Amino acid sequence: MNAILAIATGGAIGALVRHGVNVGAVRLLGHGFPYGTLTVNILGSFMMGLLIAVFAHYWHPSENMKLFLVTGFLGAFTTFSTFSLDFANLWERQAYLHSAFYLGGSVILSITALFAAMALVRAFVS
């Protein structure tokens, strides 16, 4: 039961933070491009890299804390299901250049962010 509570609590917080980023992105940049989703996918990947590296080198949290942070918070914060829908919407609006930028940016920048975070932690370990 503690694991379920950890995941649910982390998920609720992650979803609320994701919503805040999406609302903020729309207010700052408008509705023309899914900036909020792109932002949370990159930030979420960066945070995943930080957490995994920190878990390996500095901190060995309980299994429930890992479930709270990784499965709960980051699982709800990152939005690859929403990413898929946003891509489909751009494509169906025939915004092919935006579709390509969004696809490439989401995948390449998110993976790059994860590696950058891991390298950042490793630099502090060395």
Image (cartoon, rainbow, N blue to C red):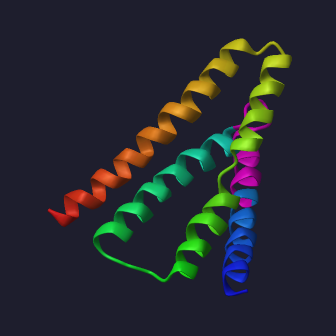
Q: Residue furthest front?
A: 1
Residue 81: give x, y in percent of width and height. Answer: 75, 43
Above or below: residue 67 compared with residue 64: above
The answer to whether residue 19 is magenta is no
- Residue 59, picture quadrant: bottom left
Q: Residue at x 66, y 68 (%)?
A: 72
Q: Residue furthest bottom?
A: 2
- Judged left or right of residue 83, residue 53 is left
Residue 11: give x, y in percent of width and height. Answer: 71, 68
- Judged left or right of residue 49, residue 106 is right
Q: Residue at x 61, y 75 (%)?
A: 68
Residues in magenta? 20-34
Above or below: residue 4 compared with residue 48: below
- Residue 38, picture quadrant: top right
Q: Main secondary structure of the magenta part?
A: helix
Q: Residue at x 62, y 65 (%)?
A: 71
Residue 87: give x, y in percent of width and height. Answer: 74, 28
Q: Quadrant of the N terminus?
A: bottom right
Above or below: residue 28 compared with residue 54: above
Residue 61: give x, y in percent of width and height. Answer: 44, 81
